[in-house]
Amino acid sequence: MNAPFSASPVPGIVNGLSVDVEDWFQVGAFENVIARGEWDSIKTRVEDNVYRVIDLFAEADVKATFFTLGWVAERHPEMIRRIVDAGHEIASHGYDHARVFTFTRAEFAEDIRKARAILEDASGVKVTGYRAPSFSIDQRTPWAFAELAEQGYAYSSSVAPVVHDHYGWPEAPRFAFRPLPWSSMIELPVTTAILGGRRVAAGGGGFFRVLPYGFSRWAIRQVNRTDGRPAVFYFHPWEVDPDQPRVGHAPLRSRFRHYTGLAKMADKLRGLVHDFRWGRMDMVAHREAARAGDLVLAGPAEGLAA
């Protein structure tokens, strides 16, 4: 396990801790080698992995948000209730991990409606947050924010304000902003840091597994201390599961991204949750709403009428 953090967290700053709940075979890295039609024939591992994550959070007495696929919630309603009973937030990750830019607006509207209905039925609580699969809200989908606002979402955490080969909206703000001038809904982008004058991804996922833990600790400290803002961190339940099946016919880059660092992930997470203050994304959204009040995204999302 990593050594305890030597300095106290920044007073008053609570970072957003989130888990993108999908099974190991539903990830973007394997979307071209494992078809959706095969999913029901594959042995699921998500429930046991989520319970490991819940136990890890309980060790540190932290609460988080579980952005969950509707497909998963349909098949594991007891898991959803256990997440809520442990004091965590249930939020939407869409129905079956299709990226937003693959939809028309009407298709997206149905996807988030369907997923939310499943999640609320399983959890018994209102769902107010959304995260796009693979952070796939970007300059191609200006209508996505409008649809989320019209369906009553309080916040989204769907933008990665970096350049990346699978996703990214580098022109977007680094911190909380209002995507629409007519809505109070806010966007909480995943965390980036500034290194050598450039934005670098620092909000979790594969970057957290592959890079030394010291990089993530440095990045979150920069965001908290230099910028005075909360970090937004995410990971997946399959990332604490080093015994998951190997997909040997997947591209080499995909296998590297998916499998590197799995054995060390749980210990790195333990270091992270003890080194900083963490909370649910709905709480962070509420706190950041006042700051985001005057910052409206410039560009194609402007002018969309409710």
Image (spheres, rainbow, N blue to C red):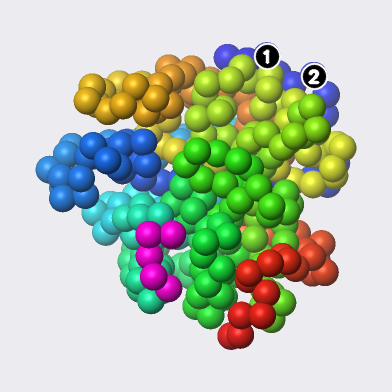
Which quadrant would the N terminus be assigned to in this image? top right
Left or right, 36 with reference to 136: left
Left or right, 249 with reference to 252: left
Residue 17 on image: x %, y %: 60, 44
In the rendered image, is residue 18 in sight?
no
Q: Report if the CB atoms under discs 1 and 2 are less than 8 Å apart.
A: yes
Q: Residue at x 15, y 45 (%)?
A: 38
Residue 59 on image: x %, y %: 56, 31
Per the model, the C-alpha gap separating discs 1 and 2 is 8 Å
Mark 1, residues whose alpha carbon is within 10 Å: few (<14), some, or many (≥20)? few
Residue 98 on image: x %, y %: 35, 55
Q: Which residues are magenta?
A: 100-105
SS at circle 1: loop
Q: Residue at x 52, y 61 (%)?
A: 140
Q: Is residue 209 above or below residue 123?
A: above
The residue positioned farthest toward the left in the image shown = 41
Q: Residue 86: which numbered mark, if any?
A: none
Q: Nearer the viewer, residue 196 or 256?
A: 196
Left or right, 284 with reference to 158: right
Under mark 2, the amino acid is Ser
In the rendered image, is residue 263 in sight?
yes
Left or right, 130 with reference to 229: left
Q: Is residue 129 above or below residue 207?
A: below
Q: Residue at x 27, y 28 (%)?
A: 250
Q: Residue 6: which numbered mark, if any?
A: 2
Which quadrant would the C terminus be assigned to in this image? bottom right
Q: Nearer the viewer, residue 109 or 283?
A: 109
Is residue 102 in the magenta section? yes
Is residue 247 in the magenta section? no
Q: Residue 3: which numbered mark, if any?
A: 1
Q: Residue at x 68, y 22 (%)?
A: 215
Under mark 1, the amino acid is Ala
